[in-house]
Image (cartoon, rainbow, N blue to C red):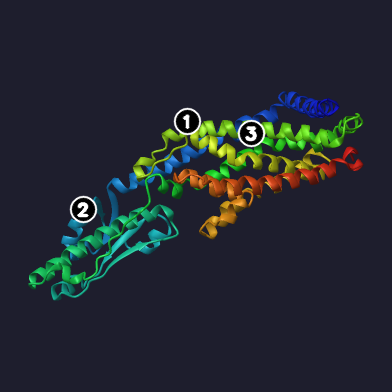
Amino acid sequence: MNTLNNSVRRTRAVLTVFLKEVRENLRDRRTLTSAFLTGPLLTPLMFVMLINFTINRELDKADKPLKVPVIGAQYAPNLVDALKAGGVVPQPAIADPEAAVRNQEIDLALRIRADYPKAWRKGEPVQVEVIYDSSQRDANTPVERVTKLIEGYARVQGAMRLVARGLSPATANPVVVAKRDQATAQSRAVLLFNILPYLFVLTLFIGGMYLAIDLTAGERERQSLEPLFANPVPRWKIFLGKLAAICAFSTASLVICLVGFSIVGRFVPAEKLGMELHLGPSFALHVLLLQLPMIVLLGALQSMVAAFAKSYREAQTYVSLLMMLPILPSVALMVMPIKPQNWMYAVPLLGQHLGILDLVRGTGVSPLHLAYCLGGSALAAIIAAGVTMQLYRSERLAISG
């Protein structure tokens, strides 16, 4: 009975601190804006708007008539006709196409050499120059489109030459490559939406950041931490109550973000690219499960870093540097595209990143990978919380200035 009463008293102390911090910060407009508006709502909206703009722009470029200056069009009228049939609108020749491309006046230009007719009549290979700047991202789609049209025209003319000589067109292609793509429409979505794991972790981070700073460095600066420590309550209970408040705000921020993505995700024209994107309730619940230990880990790390600061502004600087941590897995996988191994799921942040990509791909997270992910991140969260508890025992934490 005594053991039960002691347990209730310990829980009551943590709950009292938790409710106090939540109640006070629900009145703070800055905390509410960062936790429930800036990250969780604006992130899915801006992401979907950007994706829609990019997809529609690229598809528009691929479909609409493409104006291309052609130098020497009179030397290859049949080629020019083939380009017209493919949606290319030949434009008058310009004096210096190289300079025009470098100055971004045009995306690309074609140059047909004066010896084109002579070489063509002899059956010799002829050269058509595609002048472009590969550093201009806008030029990639038009260049690829024109190049495919020229290559298609070349294949047709080559086959006709073989037929004229009594040979089968297949003679020029003794080996035919047959590609068997095993990717599904949903698994291809990873190519476009591989930034989602970073956005979810960033939402978690921002959701609890201002609360973590205010509950540590903020109270220290306002000199309200010392009276709180003067109460006959163990410091570790005070820390757990504050950590629970930070985790509550972070969790609410993530839930709002997941609901936002499940709604606006329906407006992503993924089917235009042959992709499928499922961000519904099942996806949201699995992401929330994967992020549970990360919520505690980030809250403990933010509290730890803020504990070293003597003022709110100083803590903002320190915690902002910590914000670079969530981007590391995304950058690492983009720079070094490696095949996931089982042990990688046990690495905090990296495991969540890989698990969410598995969900986007549609393969799901296997029980083994889920256990690695939750276990590794939970262990790191316990260590971070333990270190922060030790900082809370220091008398210097309660002293401002």
Q: Residue at x 50, y 37 (%)?
A: 283
> Looking at the picture, which amino acid does disc 3 mark?
Thr
Quarter containing the N terminus:
top right
Q: Give the quarter of the image for residue 222.
A: top right
| Image quarter hosting the C terminus | top right
For the residues labelled 2 and 3, say whether their Cβ atoms are less than 8 Å apart: no
Asked if disc 1 and disc 3 are in contact, CB closer than 8 Å, the reply is: no
Element marked by disc 1: helix
Against 363, residue 4 (above or below) is above
Left or right of 359 on screen, residue 32:
right
**Front in this rendered view, residue 169 or 55:** 169
Above or below residue 147? Residue 115 is below
How many neighbours does mark 3 have within 10 angstroms: few (below 14), some (14-19), or many (20 or more)? many
Give residue 166's position: percent from left, percent from top.
Answer: 7, 72
Look at label 2 and name its amino acid.
Answer: Lys
The relative height of residue 331 versus residue 156 in the rendered view (above or below) is above
In the drawing, what numbered circle is on residue 84?
2
Marks 2, 3: nearer the viewer: 3
Query: Disc 1 designates what residue?
Result: 263
Mark 2 Cα shell of 10 Å, populated few (<14), some (14-19), many (≥20) = some
Reading the image, the residue beneath label 3 is 251
Which residue is at 22% across, 71% downward? 126
What's under tag 1, amino acid-wise? Answer: Ile
